[in-house]
Amino acid sequence: MRLRLATAWNIVKAWLLVLSGCALLAAIALPFHEYRIVSLLVFFGLLVAGAAYWYGDRVALGMVGARELPLGENPALHGTVERLAVASGLPKPRLYLLPDGHPRALSAGRGPRGAAIAVSRGFLGAATPAELEGVIAHELAHIRNRDILVQTLAVVVAAALLETSRIGGWLSRALLFVLGPVAAAVVHLLLSPKRELVADRAAATLTGSPHGLADALIRLEQASELVEFRANPATEPLYTFNPFAEEGLAALFVTHPPVGERVRRLRELDPDWREKLRAA
């Protein structure tokens, strides 16, 4: 029941974002009493919303430099994703590769039948099988809950606002000063940190253990302290873990709970893990 409510609420938020955008476009033209222009702007807003719905995952994946991963290039990863997807009752999402060495993973799309998961080459090389399963299960939980629908739309809108500041020429910095907080406000209005905690718990249930994901989060945090990650900060909601340094513009877009809290909650799902470790 709780899962259905969360899924329904994500769909409602997506519609609210679309309707708010159309209302804003209409409000721009209403003072001029040109109702034909109002109709055209609303129609344009609906076209943009439709494009964002159907192609938002491709836009988001293009922003992070991902490329589709053929089955023959990594059959083991495809097998892991398919096995976990079947256990979740989901179609197998498309798989993408982030070609750099910074360990990270993300998901994007519109829902169970239009989803994609991307994993970096660095994470594939560093993660243990249990850690990889934990991260994949976490992303599958976002897909099942339709978190990715809202995340992808929020990222596309926020990134578009940030890119708009570039047209200002010498006014770019001033525009960024205004549009940056607006873009961050859109992200935070649509996304709650609780979605990550819910996905963490679902991943632990799916894999049968909370420790794979907990260990993966620790590994990702340690990697972020060693190597600075540079990208569009608006993409932060897509990742399993926030890979950005929480400073400057990137600090405005943080939507993930602290890793320490997430790891603690995961370990609490198996309170006897310390005794099991000693016994081993």
Image (cartoon, rainbow, N blue to C red):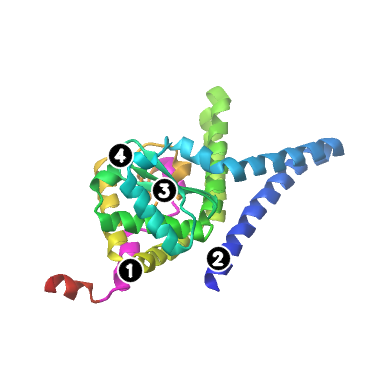
Q: Look at mark 4 in the image and give the residue it sits on.
A: 228
The mark nearer the N terminus, 1 or 4, is 1
**Dominant SS type (magenta):** helix
Residue 249 location, quadrant: top left
Which amino acid does the dot numbered 3 rest on? Leu
Closer to the camera in the image, 245 or 159: 159
Residue 197 in magenta stretch: no
- The residue sitting at 38% across, 66% down in the picture is 206
Task: Name the front one of labels 1 and 4.
Answer: 1
Residue 261 in magenta stretch: yes
Task: Name the front one of labels 3 and 1.
Answer: 1
Q: Sort mark 3 into few (<14), some (14-19) or many (20+) by Cα contacts within 10 Å.
A: many
Q: Which residues are magenta?
A: 248-271
Using the numbered discs, state the Cα–Cα distance from disc 1 to disc 4 in whole angstroms. Answer: 33 Å
- The residue sitting at 44% across, 60% down in the picture is 86
Using the numbered discs, state the Cα–Cα distance from disc 1 to disc 2 in whole angstroms. Answer: 23 Å
- The residue sitting at 26% across, 52% down in the picture is 219
Task: Name the front one of labels 1 and 2.
Answer: 1
Q: Look at mark 1 in the image and give the residue it sits on.
A: 208
The mark nearer the N terminus, 2 or 3, is 2
Q: Position of residue 141 (x, y in %)?
A: 45, 60
Which amino acid does the dot numbered 2 rest on? Ala
* Mark seen at residue 18: none
Q: Look at mark 2 in the image and give the residue it sits on.
A: 6
Which amino acid does the dot numbered 1 rest on? Gly
Using the numbered discs, state the Cα–Cα distance from disc 3 to disc 1 in whole angstroms. Answer: 21 Å
Task: Name the front one of labels 2 and 4.
Answer: 2
The mark nearer the N terminus, 1 or 2, is 2
Using the numbered discs, state the Cα–Cα distance from disc 2 to disc 4 in whole angstroms. Answer: 34 Å
Q: Secondary structure at mark 2?
A: helix
Residue 253 visible in the shown view: yes
